[in-house]
Amino acid sequence: MIGTVIKHRYELIEKIGEGNLFSVYKCEDKIENRLVAMKILLPQYSADRMFAERLLVEAKAMVGVAHPGIVEVYDCGEQEGIYFVIVEYVRGVDLRERIRRSAPFTPSTAVDAGMAICEVIDFAHKHGFVHGDLRPGNILVTPEGHIKIADFWVGGAIASSQTLSANAIMRSIHYMAPEVAEGKTPAQASDIYSVGIILFELLVGVVPFDGDTPIAIGLQHARAPIPSVRSLNPGVPRNLESSVAKALQKAPESRYRSAKAMLNDLKSAREGLRTSKSGPPDQQAAIPDISEASVLSETEPALLAALRRTLLAIVLIVAVVSALLIGYVWMRPGEITVPDMLGKTLTEAQQVANANHFQIAVKSEQFNDDYSEGTVYYMNPAGGRSIKAGKVVDVWISKGSRYATVPNCLRLTTENARERIAAAGLNVGEISQEYSSAIAAGSISKQVPSAGKKTERGQPVNLVISLGPDPTVEIPADSAGSAQSGPAQSFDVKFTVPKGRDPQPVRIIVLDDNGENVVYSELLHPGDKVNQTVQGTGKEITIRVYIADKLVREEHSR
């Protein structure tokens, strides 16, 4: 497939891997001019159309979810039977390989990794995403040491297929919570259990539960006592062992209530590790007092006098070297605790850095729904961790929410509509004109997208300007009193798209003297608000609202 271009956009450059579900290719995104990774569903799973479509739905829900610790999903789709997902291209190796090479890690390194994982999981859980298949193979480590978690969108699709769920158990049983192994849907507590297993493995070098078969391993998850981390690695502090044990409780309700709670305990453990290293300063080496050294008498043998002078010189040299070493130890940069800068502007963060003797570097600016534009929404190392004075802390700056709500421009002048669109973070698109008997000339009679719809910032809003009534249409003199037709009327139709997982087609139909006309048709997401002005002609007008091709509302005007 090398050289193939998918969707007239993604050119496959080289194959970089193949897993249980996907072949993975490095691609060039010709529109964004960047490298991306394309995950192509293996043919044996593409044949299961229901699973493949569910996979795309799950992937699409992750598009736009931006966090430095998550492998971002850019796009997904199907072309000629090929189901693909476009994700961020990440250089580095997975945590599984790092464990194979270097485990067990020092407690401080393991805690730093555990904190990074918890930060990402906490973000995902707050945004309604559960991973469901968290294991070292899904955690990537960049050359700079940053952690990125992949495939948040896979677990939900796998859970919808009994065959694939069974395969997933075979692959992930070492990291799978007992309730998930029993067939229950993964939840936040399940992810926390998986984090506990990963942290155990980082500290000890092996997983806590193992066996010859998946069934045997699953039974250990459900019944076997939690092995003591300290018995396998005595260098692990007791509070860190307690954190691992709490995450690995058999009953979900006995584990940490949230990834944030686990993160806070790990921060405490990290602080304990830091303070345990910084004991009282070494006492200064005693410098011998040689000011009262005996003066060699003339009667001393020459050899003895020479020996005494040599010994005094050696003592003096040792004292001077010791003093220099002690001075270096006391004057070299010490460790500092990084303050939490989340939510601060770049200027404020720089002031904090200057006051605490470290530097900051802006790694990226991305959209973020939780932090206002221009503020820090992620930092590495995180607040509360220890670094050497003078070192660099990387920060990520929010560009504000990726999405904007389309304003209502109907009946506004063109100038006022432009102002309202710009204030919403959108652009004015195509402007056209048409006759309208219901909207005064010079005012906006139609807009696309409609008011209340959410769309990405910078997207265009197309406007139609009314030219007033069509002068070529002759109105009979007795039309005002005619029983066959009536005056034009306008109606404001307002409603919210009901809850659900998938986008739904929404239509508004008007039945009037001109017959039946579709006046609004959009594919909307659950929770989207519709505030649409529609027109009808005649004394009897019927307005019908259809969602997912079902009539949900009907109104009559007489």
Image: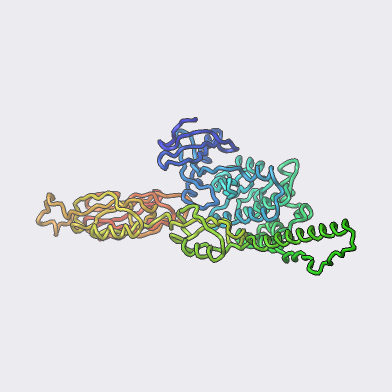
For residue 425, which quarter of the picture?
bottom left
Residue 269 visible to the viewer:
no
Give whichever of 386, 317 is nearer the camera.
317
436 horizontally vs 337: left or right: left
Whole-percent x, y for residue 165 in the image: 61, 43
Q: How many marks?
A: 0
Q: Position of residue 132 (x, y in %)?
A: 60, 49
User: What residue is rendered at 54% in x and 58% in y?
Assistant: 359
- Which quadrant of the view contains residue 125? bottom right
Q: Is residue 409 left or right of residue 133?
A: left
Between 134 and 159, the one lying in front of the other is 134
Q: Residue 166: where, in percent of width, then height? A: 64, 42
Which quarter of the rendered picture does the C terminus lie within?
Answer: bottom left
Front-most of 316 and 168? 316
Q: How is the image coloured?
A: rainbow
- Looking at this rendering, what residue extends furthest in the left direction? 477
On the question of residue 22 being in view, the answer is yes
- Which residue is most to the front? 298
Residue in the image at 51% along x and 53% along y: 67
In this picture, is 502 found above or below 400?
above
Q: Residue furthest bottom?
A: 292
Q: Is residue 241 above or below residue 166?
A: below
Q: Residue at x 74, y 65 (%)?
A: 284
